[in-house]
Image (cartoon, grey):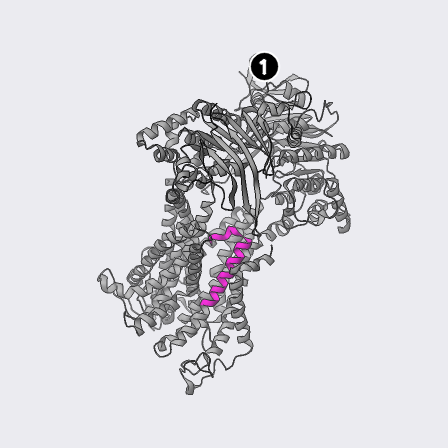
Amino acid sequence: MLRYTLHRVALAVPTLLIVAVIVFVLMRAIPGDPAQIMLGDLENPRALAQMRSDLGLDRPVAMQFVIWLKRVFAGDLGNSIAQQRPVLEMLWGAFGVTATLVIPAVAIASLLAIPLGMIAAWKQNTLVDVTVVTAAIVFLSIPSFWLGLIFLLVFGLKLDLLPVVGYVSPLEDFREGIRYLIMPVTALALIETGVLIRMARSSTIEVLRLEYITHARAKGLTETAVALRHALKNAMAPTWTMIGLALGSLLGGAVVTETVFTLPGIGRLLVDSIFARDYPVVQGCLLFITLIYVLVNLAVDLCYPLFDPRVRL
Amino acid sequence: MSWRSLWRRPNAIVGGLLLLVMIGAAIVGVLYTPYDPVANDLATRLKPPSPAHWLGTDEWGRDVLSRLLFGAGVSMTISSFTVLAAVAVGTLLGAAAGYFGGWFERVAMALLDALLAFPSLIMALGMMAVFGPSRTGVIAALTLAYMPSVARVVRGSVLSVREKEYVEASRVMGNSEPFTMFRHVLPNCVAPIIVLATALFGWALLAESALSFLGLGVPPPASSWGGMLSDSRNYVGQAPWLALVPGISISLTLLGINLFGDALRDQFDPRMKNL
Amino acid sequence: MNAPTLSIEGLAVAVRTPEGGARRVVDDVSFDIAPGKMVALVGESGSGKTMIGRSVLKLLPPVARTEAGRILFKGTELVAASDAQMRRVRGREIGMVFQEPMVSLNPALTVGFQMMEALRLHHRVTEAEARRQALEMLERVKIVDPHGCFRAYPHQYSGGMRQRIMLASVLVMRPALLIADEPTTALDAIIQKEVMDIMSELTRDIGTAVLLVSHDLGMVASYADEVVMLRHGKVVEKGATQEILLAPRHEYTRMLLESLPTRAVSGGRPEVAGDNLVEVDKVSVEFRKKPRFFWQRSERFRAVDGASLTLRKGETLALVGESGSGKTTIGRALVRLVEESDGRIRFEGREVTAFDARSLAAYRLQTQMVFQDPFSSLDPRMTLAAIVAEGLRTLPGLSRAERDTRARAMLAEVGLPGDYGDRNPHELSGGQRQRVSIARAIVATPKLLVADEPVSALDVTVQKQILTLFSALQAKFGFSYLFISHDLGVVEQIADRVVVMYRGHIVEQGTRDQVYDSPHHPYTLRLLAATPRIARAGGSGYRLVRHEAAQAAAPQGFDYFSGGGAPVMHEVAPGHIVALKAA
């Protein structure tokens, strides 16, 4: 197990490095003087010279990358042009909000989808199965931001049940916080449930075809015992990986949902900074979001042997 | 590959019909719309659906139906180009990686893994930050976001076909590696590519709508469905149809793509069920 | 007279067809199993034998349904039984062992857990008691470390061991009936014998009746008390095994028995004299396993270690061995799918490794291969004529039309004339596909044909046809064959000379008669002992022939080679060589 862990961690490192390179290249691809870009509209020759030397613009590009990388490692992502605050500080705050949006969405989606998917697979081609599959397809075809918009329209404006703007952290005030989060979380969760149902269903169908299921039945086990003890674990393995990927698509979906509900999350921060040409923040968001995604998938991978001991090696 | 029995599947029928309608709308939108989709007519602002304007008008007095049709053309063109580009680049890369192996494969896979480490919308946003809102920018951004998935699938497919005995037989017969690759390996990998391309079309459409919704996609005044949705936000209370119409259109199109794609996948490549 | 443990009366099972109808795969089948007896259901693919086995426990696949008949187990009728009743019977009274040991154990659960499951469910014993019984049974199936096995996962064990674990977990319940569905088909010959011996011994001890489903007549003749012959879902003949062998009544039974490979077909074969076509001189083939981290060294693995053999013009040389023996690797080295890492391969006197591109291309035309799996050796997207014609692609000076004509002619030669050429592989049966494979391999009239387990995936009757085809083609065109197989019966029929391999080394080689009649190496003896043969016994009857040969002692100062280091090759008779090592 230790070897597997080390192997997986070792694989993540080059990925993160290349990600850093991509972000670096992206930022340098923005037309204009890299130093001026980082300062925005500020016209201060001294600050400009300082930025120039900070970025190492007189050195070869590879060296600039290394300099930049060192600073990133040290946590120095520069200062926001718009707010004049360290970028890292802003990222943490914003990510906290996004986390309260995305984590419950993934959790709800998984808890709903896995049992529904398994039941649909168990009763393949019956009415139950067809209903579940149709519902799943319909849900995953709806753009999450549009669903959010509809919720806003119905529950927020027309019925005036829930607030349409703003955010309160449920960690501070649970009841109030929930009121702000119910609609966006539901919008995200509903769509993701559709995606995960299909995954859970198809991997359960795969597993059910396998001979050890027939063998389990041949022992005289009840269908429930066969389902829970034998099928579940094996069907979970690919589904578990999918949950990690679902988080990625939710992070993307959160960008738009945060915009719709004006939540101060990291997605909205990214979009606003792009419009404001606040490039230090843009850079910081890209790095941060990707880092989180890679770490989450790493964690998901490390849990994989729980479901499939063959991987443990 | 039996195309004929595909049409017996209910998925394919419903999905295919929906797609036909939507693509038809797109084609129509490019050629003809009842009103000029970008012309303002401030006298008829925010009118609900009526015989003159079947889907009402928006805040600039523009006919919603016309904008919808035109937007269909815009969105679908962008998605189509994205799919074509992503499939072309991804297939080349994935096939080369799968066939040649060695360090090339390792480097390519490392690069692709890194690209896949970005959630696709985030990658697209990053690129739009550099390009600024434009149609070509959206295509380029989305191609980069989706190309790695294609490459991975193609590589997997090539790896599995490579081991088949008829590929070995080809070598034993004295055929060169390139010949074996093009004559035996690639043609048998087509099925998963087709299935993936269908899914990609849906993803691209959704992503383009999202980008346009955020204002970083297709620039106004051209109408794209995402952009129309974004515009509708300010008037959501007064003119709910402005929010309903584009959203329903996107949903129906995606539904059609998903249904049809499912039928394709069930028919040709049951192995791909995990996508 | 005890009532039979299992009594099947007029059983009919139907399968749903894609068009919506139902097709009977089992039709009016009746037979009994007396307590403690082993009854075998024998038939080729499509005979319905597996469906019968599954219908007893009501474990039919969703597309199948029992349409008619009764299944009486110790007096209780099973077809009409409820799910709850079936669950009480399953595992406790009737146990089942399946064919593929690789997938019949759940990879996500430990062996111990899976073994105790049935015990705790049906017998309501404490966990400690269940453990004790399970461990005891693991010992009886000769698992070396029962305690370790308990905690381990199935994927850590080989196929033969997994089957033994399956047997243990089923028999620990002491069921009245064991259904064994092709339990050893996926295993090597020697392991097959071990598993069957264990199964036979244990069931006799416990008093379990056995329903054995198999296509292997030899194995059935060795272990089963009674036999039920099936064809297309119907019983053609049934009775005591020895009686049926001695006096088969139905013509299908007789045809099956006749199709079994025997020596008699080829008769006494004079030794083929002539030049050596191929010389394999101390060849080793090494493979490197890809390292997981790029800083690790890659592990090396020797599939073939210092093997030497010769193949003469016009003869059939058989390479025999179990999986991992290296026989396939030698074949692949000859057709240049792999390269040898040591030693020399010579073809018509010239060294193959030294070939430049042109000579290699010419060599390729002279040496072709027929593959094992009829279902993956033909490109599914091509027509048969195109597949065969591709073999002529590298022959200079042929137009497309000419290639097509020659291809079709060759297809006719192998028994697929006329418009077969326009069909696609998926329209053909396994045997027909192998014919296409053969046609493709010989269309450019090579000198050497390497056949890698060409009949292993085929039914016995089809197997006979393909072997006959091989012989006919050799007589007509003068091919030399390198015939690779694990099936000693097939090799006995077709080979002039035999080479026995074990773990990459050649342990014995000689003429067919020498190796079969006076084997020296213990491994050869074990292989022969594990291969029961059915031979003619006067008139129209057959009998089971067990291989009995005494182990000849090794010469003074030597032991028989068993791995590790280099063997010393010793000639015990002209042309008959055995591998020894210094004592």
Looking at numbered disc 1 in the image, what kind of residue is underneath it?
A: Ala
Q: Residue tagged by mark 1?
A: C552
The answer to whether residue C368 is visible is yes
In the displayed orientation, state which residue is furthest to the top.
Answer: C556
The crowd level at tag 1 (other Cα within 10 Å; few <14, some 14-19, many 20+) is: few
Left or right placement of residue C174 versus residue C485 in this view:
left
Q: Nearer the viewer, residue A306 or C309?
A: A306
Q: Is residue B263 magenta?
A: yes
Residue C287 vertical placement versus C385 (above, below): above
Q: At which x and y percent is residue C152?
A: 39, 34
Q: At which x and y percent is residue C491?
A: 64, 28
Q: Is residue A57 magenta?
A: no
Left or right placement of residue C383 versus residue A188 in this view:
right
Which stretch did the figure color magenta? Answer: B251-275
What chain does mark 1 sit on? C
Q: Which residue is drawn at the image coordinates 25% and 65% (left, top)?
A: A168
Q: Which residue is drawn at the image coordinates 40% and 63% (left, top)?
A: A57
The answer to whether residue B117 is visible is no
Q: At which x and y percent is residue C342?
A: 60, 32
In the rendered image, which quarter is residue A280 located in?
A: bottom left
Query: Of helix, strand and loop, which mostly describes the magenta segment?
Result: helix
